[in-house]
């Protein structure tokens, strides 16, 4: 592939060196648990606060919602997937930019690692973070009785896929950001609109007709849809399409992410 | 051990490296000496497979960097210009996780990390955050990181830039130990003392080209002379007389800054007796003078 030819470090066909991937993942894990007292607030406490506020608070106002027994049940998978998105996206945008800016990637690239393996390790870590927040918030929701534990296990599937979709997407920002403030766009352009308009807080069907297809095309929507399928035990074909849509995005986003990162790091 | 042939690097319209060739033998310490922007860093980045070549070739230990970048990085220890330490990790974690990424087992990596920390006198800082280290310590940590896997070839980009003289001496001592251990070293620097102290041979670089290469003493003899004259004068006429005196001789007058320097192309001390209105002092020729003689400019732009 021409993408690989531009770089003397790797080709898509060459074997993946798994040590590179585990090495990067281990670096993230080591750093993360050093600060676990801080990081847990984002993994568990912040989304749990949102869950309780919205589930209890707004739930009081909502008498009936399409496709769930209560508003709390409706909103639980949405908030969990939103949190999974935030973690993955933040990891490969803000944190990856920090690693570019402080030559941490450069140091890693002096070992026998390729840029593709670097993104593999980072995305593996982004997925780990999506899973950590999904497991902890879902466990909390199970305790509240808003989701049953078997459905919660099913939600891990869209959590992994979101980790990969947003983990690869985050690199678009890290690799092109000229300065740190640029990364605010991650929130203003991606995370915040997606958080609110992906069917997390209200069914997409309440949106004006012309907005609906746009909302369905947004990258967080399939994750929320699939998670809700598991949460409300209403799995059908449309959830499979959501899964395939996410796989499609991953297959498109990943090569772009690698290309952009290579352009940024190897020059 | 390292062979660079006809190497070019272009960034758009900028010719950062403009057709250089050199060779570093096994166990040798080879320096690239030149001012900022001479192409030293770009050359070292290409050698470490951190930058694609525009044309030419580089082999390290007989392995082609372009074709087998991964294999080259297995035998290469790299100290990049920026320390590139990981602020999310402790000093020891920085090393042991780097060693793991290099291919050591976690256990081996930890053992080696402690060994290199001890060698560089940083063992009592193992649990510290990297941002708590002084500049000199950070630099030593970067060098120790490059030595984790005991690579046969080490590339150091400006190992002592920005360090105070004490820290610089300390780094030099340790590089000398490394050299005695038989490691092949390629280093870049814009400090002529550093090049003169550490390098067996060096290349004088400017504007992406190698102007000359050789052993430090040989280069000084050839381009500057064992002794150079420094001329101080405030009189234009005296300077003009000096210029005339030196015309068609093997001596060259370089008027840079407040002082004029006379270098020699035949190794002999320039005879400046009988000139009026000037103060002449003689001192030992050095690599600065070589650079001056080759480019007409001073090496240091500080």
Image: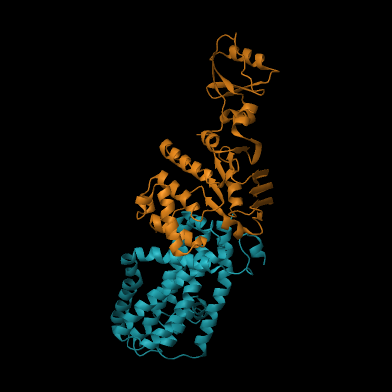
Chain colours: A cyan, B orange
Answer with the quarter of the image where residue B166 lies: top left
Q: Is residue B110 visible?
A: yes
Q: Which of B205/A164 is in front? A: B205
Residue A144, image x, y percentages: 29, 84
Q: Is residue A98 above or below residue B295?
A: below
The mark tally for this picture is: 0
Q: Is residue A15 left or right of residue A147?
A: right
Q: Which of A205/B87 is in front? A: B87
Q: Is residue A186 visible?
A: no
| Residue name at image x 48 percent, y 40 percent | B172
Residue A235, image x, y percentages: 46, 90
Q: Which of B172/B150 is in front? A: B150
Residue A203, image x, y percentages: 42, 83
| Residue name at image x 62 percent, y 58 percent | B69
- As drawn, which residue projects farthest toward the front? B181
Residue B213, image x, y percentages: 65, 36
Q: Is residue B78 above or below residue B246?
A: below
Q: Is residue A95 left or right of residue B223?
A: left
Q: Is residue A180 left or right of residue B10?
A: left
| Residue name at image x 59 percent, y 10 percent | B275
């Amino acid at each position: 592939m021409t993408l690989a030819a531009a770089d003397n470090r790797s080709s898509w066909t060459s074997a993946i060196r798994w040590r590179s991937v585990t090495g990067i993942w281990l670096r993230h894990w080591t750093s993360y648990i050093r600060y676990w007292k801080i990081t847990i607030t984002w993994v568990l406490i912040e989304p749990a606060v949102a869950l309780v506020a919205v589930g209890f608070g707004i739930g009081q106002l909502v008498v009936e919602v399409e496709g769930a027994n209560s508003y709390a049940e409706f909103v639980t998978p949405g908030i969990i997937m939103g949190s999974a998105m935030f973690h993955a996206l933040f990891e490969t945008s803000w944190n990856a930019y920090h690693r570019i800016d402080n030559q941490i990637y450069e140091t890693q690239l002096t070992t026998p690692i390729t840029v593709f393996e670097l993104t593999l390790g980072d995305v593996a870590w982004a997925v780990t973070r999506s899973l950590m927040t999904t497991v902890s918030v879902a466990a909390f929701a199970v305790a509240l009785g808003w989701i049953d534990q078997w459905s919660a296990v099913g939600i891990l599937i869209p959590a992994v896929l979101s980790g990969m979709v947003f983990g690869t997407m985050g690199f678009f920002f890290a690799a092109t950001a000229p300065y740190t403030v640029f990364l605010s766009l991650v929130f203003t352009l991606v995370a915040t609109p997606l958080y609110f308009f992906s069917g997390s807080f209200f069914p997409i069907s309440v949106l004006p007709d012309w907005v609906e297809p746009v909302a369905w095309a947004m990258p967080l929507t399939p994750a929320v849809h699939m998670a809700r399928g598991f949460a409300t035990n209403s799995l059908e074909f449309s959830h499979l399409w959501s899964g395939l849509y996410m796989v499609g995005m991953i297959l498109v986003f990943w090569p772009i992410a690698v290309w952009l990162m290579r352009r940024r790091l190897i020059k | 051990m390292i062979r660079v042939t006809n190497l070019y690097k272009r960034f758009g319209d900028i010719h950062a490296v403009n057709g250089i060739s050199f060779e570093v033998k096994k166990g040798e310490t080879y320096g690239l000496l030149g001012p900022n922007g001479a192409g030293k860093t770009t050359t070292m980045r290409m050698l470490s497979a951190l930058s694609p070549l525009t044309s030419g070739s580089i082999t390290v230990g007989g392995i082609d960097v372009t074709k087998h970048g991964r294999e080259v990085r297995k035998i290469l220890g790299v100290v990049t210009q920026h320390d590139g330490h990981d602020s999310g990790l402790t000093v020891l974690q920085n090393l042991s996780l780097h060693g793991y990424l290099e291919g050591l087992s976690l256990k081996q990596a930890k053992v080696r990390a402690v060994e290199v920390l001890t060698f560089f006198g940083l063992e009592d800082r193992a649990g510290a955050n990297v941002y708590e280290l002084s500049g000199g310590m950070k630099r030593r940590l970067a060098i120790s990181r490059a030595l984790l896997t005991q690579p046969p070839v080490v590339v150091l980009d400006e190992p002592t830039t920005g360090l105070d003289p004490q820290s610089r001496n300390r780094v030099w001592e340790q590089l000398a130990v490394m050299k005695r251990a038989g490691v092949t070293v390629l280093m870049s620097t814009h400090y002529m003392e550093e090049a003169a102290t550490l390098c067996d041979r060096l290349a004088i670089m400017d504007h992406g080209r190698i102007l000359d290469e050789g052993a430090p003493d040989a280069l000084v003899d050839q381009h500057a002379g064992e002794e150079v004259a420094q001329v101080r004068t405030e009189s234009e006429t005296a300077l003009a007389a000096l210029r005339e005196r030196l015309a068609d001789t093997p001596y060259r007058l370089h008027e840079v800054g407040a002082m004029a320097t006379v270098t020699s192309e035949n190794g002999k001390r320039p005879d400046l007796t009988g000139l009026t209105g000037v103060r002449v002092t003689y001192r030992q020729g050095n690599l600065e003078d070589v650079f001056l003689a080759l480019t007409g400019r001073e090496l240091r732009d500080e």
